[in-house]
Amino acid sequence: MASANGRKSIFITGAASGIGAETGRLFSKRGWFCGLYDVNTAGLAAVADELGEGNSISGKLDVRSRDDWALALKGFGEATGGTMDVLFNNAGVGRHGWFEEVSGEDNDWVVDVNVKGVVNGVQACLPLLKKTA
């Protein structure tokens, strides 16, 4: 099990690619312990490998699922001693096209990830953030 060993810690959603992956790289280079979470487990494994052993913990997280949040935070909290300095609630999705051509299901998915996922994250992470403050 990776351990923060007293380092500052950041929990990153959408960490398998793009801004989330770059944020993990940046914070790791600055000595932080990184929690890397995404639905893309292959991408997560690549980023975690880049950061090196002992510098991160990673796992699958569908931000729409409160159960996934609880499981991810259990492992992260064990690795950090129950602390979290920063939540980078970065996961997000989009559908593009003419408004009338985007399905109701696609709109629901976008709102569920981009709005409900953020709210779920803040609610789930607040105890660790408050403990660290």
Image: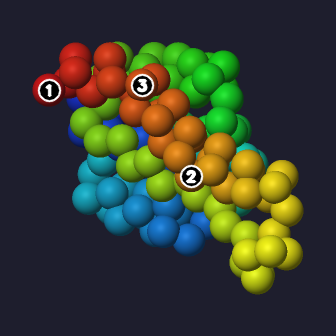
Q: Quadrant of residue 23 in the image?
A: bottom left
Query: Earlier along the polypeptide chain: callout 1 or callout 3?
Result: 3
Identify the residue at horizontal 48%, vertical 55% (top origin): 90
Q: Earlier in the sequence, mark 2 or mark 1?
A: 2
Residue 114 vs 10, above or below: the answer is below
**Amino acid under disc 1:** Ala
Asked if residue 63 can be seen in this view, the reply is: yes
Q: Residue at x 28, y 51 (%)?
A: 31
How packed mark 1 is, by other alpha carbons closer than 10 Å (few <14, some 14-19, many 20 or more), is few
Amino acid bearing label 2: Asn
Q: Residue at x 50, y 61 (%)?
A: 20
Per the model, the C-alpha gap separating discs 1 and 3 is 16 Å
Given residues 69 and 118, the one toward you in this image is: 118
Q: Determine which residue is flagged by label 1.
A: 133
For residue 123, the mark is 3
Q: Cα distance, mark 2 to mark 3?
A: 15 Å
Q: Answer above or below: position of 59 versus 126.
A: below
Instruction: Say if residue 50 shows up in the picture.
Output: no
Measured as percent of width and height from the top left, residue 74 is found at 53, 17
Residue 114 is tagged as 2
